[in-house]
Image (spheres, rainbow, N blue to C red):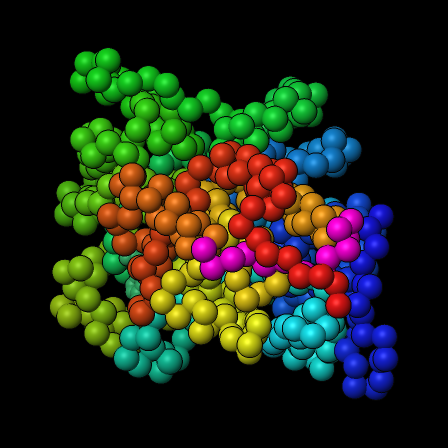
Amino acid sequence: MVMTGTNANSAADDTSPDACDAIIIGAGFGGLYALHHLRDELGLSVRAFDSAGGVGGTWWYNRYPGARVDAPSSPFYAFTFSQELVDDWDWSETQTAGPDVLAYLEHVAERFDLSKDIQFETWVTGATYDEAGQRWTVETDRGDRVSARFLICATGALFVANKPDYPGIDDFAGECHHTGRWPHEPVSFAGKRVGVIGTGSSGIQSIPEIAKQATHVTVFQRTPQYSLPARNRPLTAEEAARYKEDWPNLRESMNRRGGWPFPTSRLRASDHTADERHERYEQMWAEGGMHLAINSFVGVLVDEELNEEVSEFVRGKIRSIVHDPETARKLLPDYHFGTKRLILDNGYFETYNRDNVSLVDLRDDPIEAFTETAVLTKHGEHPIDMLVLATGFDAVSGSMLKINPTGRGGVSLAEKWDTRFSTYLGMMMAGYPNLFMIHGPGSPGVLFTMPLGGERQTAWIARCIRHLDEAGLGAMEPTDDAEAAWDHEITSMAERTLYPRTNSWYTGANIPGKPRQFLAHLRGSQYFDRLAEIADDGFHGFVFEECR
Ligand code: NA7
């Protein structure tokens, strides 16, 4: 057990905030594990807040039809820290469905008795650092004021919904739902003409499901996407048993291989003829999931020529699946394969062969306005009864800016991040002592298995807390130099790949006015080795303050 709270406000009066050791914002994967680890392993007093009505974070909010993990998931998109937890949960499919992830997180919360320390339906409206007291005070929309030495922001990389501001969009009189804020009551599409804006994961997962019920679906597409067949199927009992038995090895392998225990290709494209390469692409396509991207040849996301070959292979698949050549043409992506988030679908391109689905290519025919009953594009009017906004998120940095903590000298995060999302290790920031982010900008975040990444970041946070307590120190924060060096490292790593050449939410390009910066560390396994080295090395890049 760690002794903290040495400088909790001792002269508490009626206006003093409640005190605890750590406050956690968010009760998704990251927040739940942080709560369990800091409370049950470190013995801290912890309070957590979440705006949702229950645990789950992203999975509590994103309940749109067809929602699934956008990676080869079961049983790897899950916590890894407890063999008992692995043993007592059975995943049913290879690509986990949203409701199953949510049920799992509810099970975790119950098993580790987490909900008693989480206050739901509570927005954190502010967080302010008191330099003299070395404490954070958090305020909520329910009137709570709570102070703690440590503030853990597990606020989610995909939380702040991006709503387009087309003229008249608020005049639309029919039902309108954002996929990231989907209602908890059933939504019926039956008998309705549904317009869907957006063809990222959420659009591509939901469109086939909506089309099964709706009278008509009109898809408004700004950028065509590379989407790979998920090949979702039930997990067999033998597979499930094998995973459980082999879990320690699988976990080790996930840690070493960028978050997933799957092989990545060591084959060099130049050692193979064009026919051999094509045959391998076919195998990977048949295998489904991310195999085409990670297991065909080395360097798909680095080598422009190889990337173009894979891009053209996928375009060929789209042409062969979609019957109408004009629709197929509109669906062909023209950016570098894999540089926007890759999508795994269950029959997306096939959906365009249905009579009740049509596609509007916004590059040729942009949306100009909305009326009460229709979307008006440059070349036509599209009457709809329901609008689905699958338009994504102010990703990675947006949820931190919603809280907009105030650090040293009264500097708000919005001021600090005005032009760059500066962090050290994607976890801490100069001027914000003892504030830790899980999956913050500059960490592997969305490019690593998020549950495992959150576990490992939390273990590192725990190391920091132990170090402070053992050394009798009050606070730690990175130096400006460490932040600048980290920024340089993340950026140069990205620039060695094709990622930054494409407009995507990885670079902030989906949000008008957002600073352009590649937001993730591209080498997850090396990142976690770095975290350990930095701690072993006496926390290089940090400054410490004596306990006041
Ligand atoms: P994404 O992947 O950001 O997709 C959003 C989609 O909405 C994408 O096709 C965007 O086009 C489109 N979009 C965004 N704004 C507009 C406007 N104003 N007009 C037309 N189209 C627009 O979000 P998702 O929710 O699908 O997925 C997010 C992640 O969640 C996903 O990667 C998984 O990790 C889970 P664009 O491509 O920007 O041109």
The quarter of the picture where residue 80 lies is top right
In reply to whether residue 540 is colored magenta, the answer given is no
What residue is drawn where x is 24% and y is 13%? 271
In the rendered image, residue 26, in percent from the top left (x then y), is placed at 63, 60
In reply to whether residue 480 is colored magenta, the answer given is yes
Q: Nearer the viewer, residue 504 or 380?
A: 504
With respect to residue 276, does 368 lie above or below?
A: below
In the rendered image, residue 476, in percent from the top left (x then y), is placed at 63, 58
The answer to whether residue 434 is left or right of residue 266 is right
In the rendered image, residue 411, in percent from the top left (x then y), is placed at 51, 75
- For the view shown, which residue lies furthest in the bottom direction? 14
From which residue to which does the magenta span run? 469-481
The quarter of the picture where residue 123 lies is bottom right
Ligand 1 lies in which image quarter?
Answer: bottom left
What residue is drawn where x is 29% and y is 39%? 496
Q: Nearer the viewer, residue 386 or 143?
A: 143
**Is residue 197 at least partly visible in the picture?**
no
With respect to residue 531, does 189 lie above or below?
A: below
The quarter of the picture where residue 353 lies is top left
Q: Nearer the viewer, residue 427 or 330?
A: 427
With respect to residue 325, does 87 lie above or below?
A: above
Q: Nearer the viewer, residue 13 or 520?
A: 13
In the rendered image, residue 9, in percent from the top left (x then y), is placed at 81, 74
The answer to whether residue 31 is left or right of residue 359 is right
